[in-house]
Image: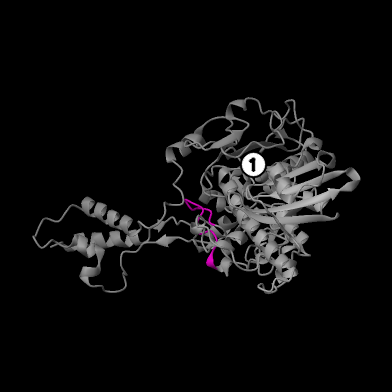
Amino acid sequence: MINTQTGSMEGHKRSDWSSIRKRSFTFGAYGGDDRFTCGDETRAEPAGNNILNILESPSRDSQPVPPSSSRDTELFEIIEKLQGSRIDEQRCEFPPPLKSQLLTIAGELPLILLSKSGGYWTDPPVERLVDVSPTSSHHGLDPGCYDIMERDGEARNYQDFFRSRYHHSFTTVDPALGPLVLSVCLEEEENKLRVILRMKECSLHGVFSLSLFPNIPSAVELAKMLCDRVTVSKFDVVGYLKAPELITTFDEHRVSPNFKFGVLYQKDGQLTEEEILSNNQESEEFKEFLSVLGETIQLQGFTRFRGGLDVSHGQTGTEAIFTSFHGREVMFHVATKLPFTEGDPQQLQRKRHIGNDIVALVYQEGGTPFLSDVIKSHFLHCFLVVRRIQRAEEAGGAAYQVSVTAREDVPPFGPVLPDPPIFTDRFQLREFLLTKLINAEISCYKAEQFSRLELRTRSSLLESLQSELFSRSQVMMGDPSLAPLPSEGVRGASEGSGGFIENFKRAIRVRSHSFETLGVQRKIVGNASQRLKTEKECDSDKPPGLPSLSDSSAELKDQTSPQEET
């Protein structure tokens, strides 16, 4: 038998263990802090159903009671088994020895430290940070040479060269290449043929002189001139009157003038995700930096690009930072302006927005470096880190040091950091940061993870487009076997683009209720123009409080919640 004192001690252990907080593996707003409780302390339970009672009870063979350490080990093993279906924890604590070592190092620390496990690159490299004096000579500080990248430089060819001229379009399904959509325009004044061939992998654009042909070539011949892998012997003519609207929507589904970026505020001594996301107070220096990025707007009733923030019910805060930049609208998800939840160390209401951005900006106040992998997210691929530094007294004013880190499969992007990476002019800093942020996101789409998603999106949309054009053309030509299709989707398809992530989610909703079934080819039936529908702004149809994509999954699965699919 266990004496009363031992039983009291074990009961105290149970009470302590029931209050231990387990870091959750979050999926948007569905996540939370899970607590494991061994039984209900307020209710008597049968001895046979209580794990602790089983562990503490003597065996039928009256064997000695195992030591307390053995019982604890066995208890933890059982708990781990009960939680075996959970994916790995969202992240681990920052190693205490490294943390204490960093905070006691004398002198200036770099803005960014790379993870020991690798997987990231940084610019400028740590070994180059020898002289970062604000009085040093500057190279590359010319805002006039800050070029903004385009995701698809030829996406507007159809809009620019075809829609205003008489042209024809054709569709077919190639046994090897899948659905194909061909557009041909005869430019008689210039004596040439302009052709666009749309395939799952890409679109091919070519211009041919008419003098090369005795007769105008057929659609099959033109397609084979652009891609020698085409094997079909016949294309079907597109006779649908509103085909240009659908084709334009498909060609420009990756073109969006809207961007959203996260903004993190890192105070001196903060090294963990929980510490950074829990900041509520904004210093005057941080407010001054935010004014460089854009203007503070009231979310209630805001009518321009909102980047997924709630403008009706105040569920994502009351203020945000917004700006227009060279014809593009940019919304910043500032962590300190997003809702703060007492008792939630992970601050999921903030993480659900910033963790689903692709690029984030980190403002450092102090000399604590930012760890490239401290924010656990499968979407965040790049961080721009800015630190305010001291200038020589005779110079006066503020100076900002900038550094960049990105995952190793993200290609380098401009504009090039000056040498040294110091900015003393607010206008130059703004031009550089906004150009760098936009180019960073466009470059991140070339990373392996996003390129796979883009290929799936394009394949689904092209299949829908080909099916739609063929079906509606048959109806126009009076095929009695096909019923007229509703026209509401065409109007929706011609609306503006909501960006790659939104188009991807729409395309996948049609093909599957889960990303787990993406590998299964399924016949798409229904109104394809509804599937091609795009929004004027990102997340404009999402009700407030609706969960976003997962930012913590081991694989990109189940990112479209049931609410989003309905």
Helix, strand or loop: magenta stretch: loop
Residue at position x 58%, y 60% from top? 508
Residue 19, image x, y percentages: 37, 61
557 in magenta: yes
Give the number of marks. 1
Residue at position x 57%, y 39% from top? 409
User: Please, is residue 500 above or below residue 368 in the view?
Assistant: below
Residue 50, image x, y percentages: 25, 67
Q: Which residues are magenta?
A: 550-562
Decide if residue 452 is on the left or right side of residue 132: left
Residue matched to label 1 = 384
Outermost residue, front side: 214
Provide the secondary structure element on which disc 1 rests: strand
Q: Residues within 10 Å of mark 1 (few under 14, many from 20)?
A: many
32 in magenta: no
Residue 288, can we see it? Answer: no
Residue 83, image x, y percentages: 35, 58
The quadrant of the rendering that contains the N terminus is bottom left
Examine the image and state in which quarter residue 85 appears.
bottom left
User: Please, is residue 340 above or below residue 293 in the view?
Assistant: below
